[in-house]
Amino acid sequence: MCAWAVLWQCSPSPRSADEKCETLLSESLSAADRQDYDAATGLAAQALDAAREAVLPRYECRSHLTLAGAGIATSRDSVAWMHAVDAENLALSGNWPDLLSQALIIKAQICSYVEVSPDFNRNDEGLGYAHEALVQAHKAGNAENEANAMYIISSLLTNKNRWNTPPEETFYREAGRYLDMADSTARAAGLEKLLRKGAQFRARYYQQGGRWEEMVDLCNAIIDSCGDNDYLSRMQAYDRLMRVLPRLGRYDEMQLCYERQNMYTQLYFRQKADETLQEIETRYETREAKRQIEKRNLQILILSLFTLLLAAGAMLVLICAREVRRRNRELENVNATKEQIIDFLSHDLRNPSNSQIETIRNLSKQAAGLTPEEIRKHCDQIARQAQTFNEDVAGYIGNLLVERSREIANVGLTHREIEIVQLCAEGLSSSEIAEKLFVSVHTVSRHRQNIYMKMGVKNVTDMIRRARELGLI
């Protein structure tokens, strides 16, 4: 068989554009479920480029929605808003009510976050988007979007009562009605994941209405329903319990919740670190498998060429044999040199560049007494050493970075807390940080107190110094 025919059979067949987009979006959503939002964003961006290149507007719309979801999850609300608007325009052009409802839900969700004072909110705007999303979801027969829209409506109505003491009864009653309808819709459609999300909305609803006992029971139910490895949901539930138990005078339980919240926070960050390590190992194994395939294909090609050379005659065989022996000697020399370099690097990796400098300096001194062929041979040897040296230094630096990431994970800072540390390092005040992140000044202050406790510092100066040690800034 011809060598090129063999290689053609070993190469994978190309995928169609829609299959490529579908695969990328599926992998992006899987990464988002693992809370690996950097990977989710990268994969969705690739899907968006592929959809635009192949002129697939529905996949382009879905890619924008996926990017918007990742933007919300990483607190990049302005980026999420732009993708949601693009998705909305595409859904309107294509008359896709299911995708239009998703875009409107995202816009309503972003509006629900923008409330740092009674005079600065977009709750009414968000309610307009959410009600229209509910209409479009019903039109599309999409129960998940219907339930999501009703949950957001409930959340926005709860927001409107945020600054009212006591809560305005009309808003509070309506919020509860939409919560009940959302739970009923999700339960009828078997959307267990969405029901767990709805429980978070209901806990906030109970908290606003002063229904402390019901909130405690709900949080305990959430904890009981969590999977073995769902550390994030447990951490959030214990955080809510710590807020309400003091109001009931149950201080011993509050202390227990505080300890468990810290425990699950540490477990969550270890889980994320382990998942990252596993991903790196999987990526390495995939690349190694690909390298083995390429090596096998090369072996097949060499074997085919060797077969053709045998047919050329005895003289050609002798010439090829001499060439093979010469190359084998070169490979033996290269392997011997490589072993010497590896042995040297294993003893001194902190200042390895001196050996290269000294080798070049010695070659320069001896050049006058060497033949051109010997000089070229020494230069080739130096080049091979430099290539091996770079690979080992890369591995060394990689180990340092892994050690640094583990140290950061042990501190236990959340993504939001890391973001606040970085903004403090830029010289922003609490009010400026609150405005930039679309949260309240009280929330920023609470985050800073948590940061001080986790980092073991007492003021901003020590916090910034510690952050520099950890490589956060």
Image (tube, rainbow, N blue to C red):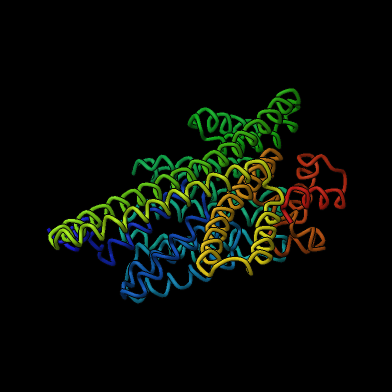
Residue at 79% over, 59% down: 425
The answer to whether residue 140 is left or right of residue 162 is left
Indicate the quadrant where residue 231 lies: top right
Q: Residue at x 58, y 58 (%)?
A: 386
Image coordinates of residue 182 in percent, x first then y, are 44, 47
Residue 170 appears anywhere in the view? no
**472 or 18, which is in the foreground?**
472
Image vertical order of residue 90 relative to residue 256, above or below: below
Left or right: 473, with 100 as reference point: right
Q: Which residue is depicted at the point 65% across and 44% down?
A: 208
Q: From the viewer's side, name the closer residue of 273 and 9.
A: 9
- How many numbered tags mark residues here? 0
**Farthest front residue?**
369
Question: Which residue is located at x 37 percent, y 74 percent?
Answer: 52
Q: Along the horizontal axis of the image, is 259 left or right of 184?
A: right
Q: Residue 342: horizontal and vertical position, in percent?
A: 57, 45
Q: Quadrant of the C terminus?
A: bottom right
| Any part of residue 121 in sight | yes
Q: Position of residue 427 (x, y in %)?
A: 82, 63
* Figure quadrant of the N terminus: bottom left
Say if 412 sits above or below 148 in the image.
above
Q: Is residue 14 above or below residue 197?
A: below
Q: Nearer the viewer, residue 375 or 409?
A: 375
**304 and 56: which one is in front?**
304
